[in-house]
Amino acid sequence: QAALTSKTEDPYPDWKPGEPVPYAALCKTFSLVELTTKRLIIMEHCSLFLRQVLRLTPGDLLSTVLLMINRLAPDYAGIELGIGESLIMKAIGETTGRSLAVIKQDQKEIGDLGLVAVKSRSTQPTMFKPKALTIQGVHKGLMNIATVTGNGAQGRKVDGIKKLLSAADANSSGKVDITKDKGGPSEAKYLVRFLEGKLRLGLAERTVLVSLAHAIVAHEAAKKDQVPSTADIEKAEAILKTVYSELPSYDVIIPAMVEHGIMNLREHCKLRPGVPLKPMLAKPTKAITEVLDRFEGQTFTCEYKYDGERAQIHYVAKDADEELSQSLPSASTEVGRGVASIFSRNSEDLSRKYPDVLAKLATWVKEDTRSFVMDCESVAWDVVEKKVLPFQQLMTRKKKDVKIEDVKVKVCVFAFDLLYLNGESIVEKSLRERRELLRQSFQQVEGEFSYATSMDGQELDEIQTFLDESVKASCEGLMVKMLDGTESGYEPSKRSRNWLKIKKDYLSGIGDSLDLVVLGAYYGKGKRTSVYGAFLLACYSPSTDTYETVCNIGTGFSEAVLEELHKALSEMVIDRPKPFYSHSSGGQHQPDVWFEPRFVWEVKTADLTLSPRYKAGIKEGVDPAGEKGISLRFPRFIKVRDDKKPDEATTSRQVAEMYRKQESVTKSKGPAVDDDF
Ligand code: ATP
């Protein structure tokens, strides 16, 4: 830190104003961050570095932030590196002239491919001095790797990695002791970790966002020869958090922030069609009485909780305001008088999955509805019986490039919220007002578009009856939402206490199912010898960026499902657990194979207990001795959650919350927690 704050010594002598930011400078910051676990110090390192970027090369701020959060573009752009461990090992071997066998052996011993890259490089003298990497260059190189398609794509991806790796650490002495300082500020180490999808710095996206706010206020004050006040810092932080939750796209926010300043950012960056926002989520409850306790003295509404896929629909009429009509992604589909896109729960573009929905959309939109963002659930629909079908039916639909004429499983869209209407964000309006606007702006079409069935009664037996009806109508249960007042506003990206879910199945259990990441598997026995018979699952801890194991599971799978899972998982096998897997080290507890962390499964459990074998929630203080983690008793597989990425799995904190709730059924009175950070 001293090096960064020092006035006399320039920590980055190679970086002059206006010149591209050296990648080495970012790696230096990473290495300082890696050496501490203290959030405030991490934030200080990040904001000092971002300030420097703002001062010297503001045009590089966007790529810098993206590289800090291990991303190349916003989620809705659908850009993924799609690189497994074996491709990276191949590239390391070919760059450093070491055989794949040696690299694999190193990986077995060291267990961190980033450090294997450092070791490989420092054992090989470099013949020539390549040009040093810049942040822009690295971002562009990674982008090229991600977007390679077609014949020989794998080979060209390896070439792209080799190009970056051979230029890495151009200015370092070459000799690095990987056992010291976690391998130091090596560029190769961070490049490889980026490619693996985990920088493992304990640097949460939330921290980068706050550091960015601090950096910009400090930079703006410094231009006036001032120091920012605490009030200004807090204001900047609040502005950036709100703006990002409504418009989660650094590509839009950062240039606007550099141009207009942080204090005016809200005027320039608002929710807009084309940029999917992170949806509001609900807290689980175990009993209707818990709901009544929570909403005591306030009005609330109950809606059916449909069991389908979340769909955020964005629409702009072609003759709407000039600026708006350009804001939808180029891939958006023409629908009647406008263009539209559908996004998933995690901001992926679903337009190629639901062309049938898009084809009908224009018939629901009333004449004077010029633009909107609507929150809905798309649900499989029985056209003969005119009723909702179970989720499993929806799953049989193709995920991409669906042709309308081939669609066998029809869907009906159930709308439950409206977030943007006719050029204006309406997230701050009450739910009652938003619902009113929703019902004024569209028309229902049977079996195609409908409003979520709702009931505003406040009495226990009315809610019980409504819950029974929802289950008869093939729904999962109810969503209960605050109806009036500021608390009933739409809170993007929050798992909020203003939305509660009651699932019929869980009323007597732990309140909710869990979405867990598959880390390993055990070979099957008896009838299951050709497939995996059981699996090791984990929850995710955003604060430590690790997957903490929570159970072994072997129940709930049909033979056909086991075969399918075996096929998909066989491609994800890795030689040893990733360093960011947290599981007990006892030999008898190790699975037969380990996987890349890709798949998320929904799992039900009877209850939760403490066990020395698993690590879930171990840092959440559930076991005062800090030795036991939480584990699931009698877990049962429900379904694959294609709409969740591994880092959107149930968090360790949520598991701990479920465990504690089960111990003493206390009322949840805490503040809303941010789900993403
Ligand atoms: P789950 O497994 O329960 O869907 P989740 O983490 O995806 O969990 P939750 O916040 O727990 O999301 O539950 C809300 C989900 O329920 C929404 O993401 C949406 O897909 C679905 N849903 C169905 N009907 C409604 C409704 N009326 N209001 C809000 N969400 C609804």
Image: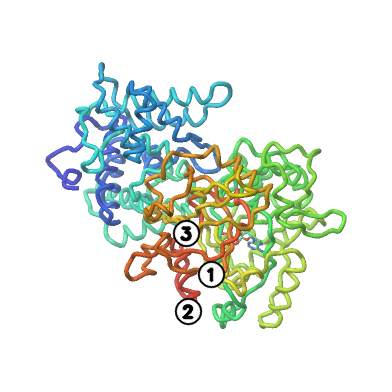
Mark 3, Cα crowd under 10 Å, few <14 / some 14-19 / many 20+, is: many
Question: What is the CA distance from the residue labelled 2 to the residue labelled 3?
Answer: 21 Å
Is 4 positioned to the left or the right of 276 in the image?
left
Residue at the disc numbered 2:
664
Q: Which amino acid does label 3 sit on?
A: Val
Q: Position of residue 494 (x, y in %)?
A: 50, 61
Q: Where is residue 320 in the image (x, y as percent from the top left)?
A: 65, 44
Question: What is the CA distance from the residue labelled 3 to the residue labelled 1?
Answer: 12 Å
Residue at the disc numbered 1:
607
Question: From this viewpoint, is residue 224 visible?
Answer: yes
Q: Foreground mark, 1 or 2?
A: 1
Q: Which of 660 and 284 is in front in this view?
A: 660
Residue at the disc numbered 3:
550
Which colour scheme appears in the figure? Answer: rainbow
Please state, as top left, top right, bottom left or bottom right, where the C terminus lies in the image.
bottom left
**Disc 3 or 1, which lies upstream in sequence?**
3
Q: Which amino acid does label 2 sit on?
A: Ser
Question: What is the CA distance from the residue labelled 1 to the residue labelled 2?
Answer: 13 Å
